[in-house]
Image (cartoon, rainbow, N blue to C red):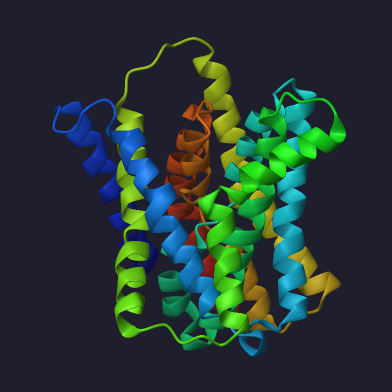
Amino acid sequence: MLSTLEILLPVFGLIFAGFVCRKRGLLGPTAASELNRFVVWLALPALLFDIMAHATWRQLYQPAFVATFALACAGIFLLILAVRLLGGRPLADASVDAIAGSYPNTGYIGFPLCLIAFGPVSLTPTTIATILVACVLFAIAIVLIEVGLQTERAPHRLALKVVGSLARNPLIVSPIVGVLVASVHVTLPQSAETFLKLLGGAASPCALVSLGLFLAEKREGQAKATKNGASLLLTATKLLLQPALTWWLAARVFALSPMLVEMAVVLAALPTGTGPFMLAEFYRREAHITSRTILLSTLGSLVTLSLLLLFMRHGA
């Protein structure tokens, strides 16, 4: 419990810092959007490029683990997407909700938590999970949001508009360029490496401060109960259903080793990362459900992750 709390406290601290700065007027009403733009256009692309540019096929070739984690994320994403669409939610907003309920915070919480729980052997599975979440799941959500925002009905024109929008999206372009750099074995200069590390390192803290700024804004109270109910449902799905599905796939379908099963389940049980909030802000969608899901899942994970790790250690 204490180790989990030590990792999650800085997350709340950054959110709280943004909240206080906005409430006290230290940062203005446009601060959340502007800080989020910095993350989307500079910091997060640098982080995604850096991850992909340094990934090796030898490191990532764990097909059973990849299939387990990818299918669990995709299954939860599609389930929420279908439920929200059937409830009358537009495709763009349903896609934001879907990624909010299936996007574990592998980068900011996953690495330190798994290092404490499993040691250095956890680095490769956590890297795989981070790539699947930050690049693949993120890209799928962006494609669906772009499709939902286009008004062109002709299929070929719709496709051209979507492709054009994706080609200008830094969150899609940066990991692709990173893969190209890795495939041709280009060694980046040390100055470029330092630049990427500094810029990429700002992604998570700035996104969390931006989230705090957003939560501090006053909003209309209409349909508040409905939005809170949706946030609670997404939080429960993220913290309970996703790790349960991951366990079933890891242990029963793909028969991973006991340690890999535990790593996969812990990574799936992580709270929602800030990626969905950045998408909601970037595409100017209603972000109340997403922001509350991040906050509630992070709070709830203090209990669920602590119990999960305690159970694993007791079982061992």
Picture coordinates of residue 282, whole percent (x, y): 48, 37
Given residues 183 and 99, the one toward you in this image is: 183
Picture coordinates of residue 211, whole percent (x, y): 36, 39
Q: Please indicate, yes or no, whether residue 132 appears anywhere in the rendered image.
A: yes
Residue drawn at x 58%, y 43% is 100
Q: Quadrant of the N terminus?
A: bottom left
- The number of numbered discs placed on residues in the rendered structure image is 0
Q: Quadrant of the C terminus?
A: bottom right
Picture coordinates of residue 138, whole percent (x, y): 61, 52
Q: Is residue 184 left or right of residue 66?
A: left
Figure quadrant of residue 198: bottom left
Picture coordinates of residue 302, whole percent (x, y): 43, 54
Asked if residue 73 is positioned above or below residue 94 in the image, the reply reads below
Given residues 245 and 45, the one toward you in this image is: 45
Asked if residue 23 is positioned above or below residue 121 in the image, the reply reads above
Residue drawn at x 31%, y 70% is 195
Residue drawn at x 54%, y 13% is 223
Residue drawn at x 62%, y 74% is 262
Asked if residue 310 is positioned above or below residue 226 in the image, the reply reads below
Q: Please indicate, yes or no, whether residue 126 appears anywhere in the rendered image.
A: no
Q: Is residue 85 left or right of residue 171?
A: right
Given residues 292 and 2, the one toward you in this image is: 292
Q: Is residue 229 left or right of residue 215?
A: right
Figure quadrant of residue 176: bottom right
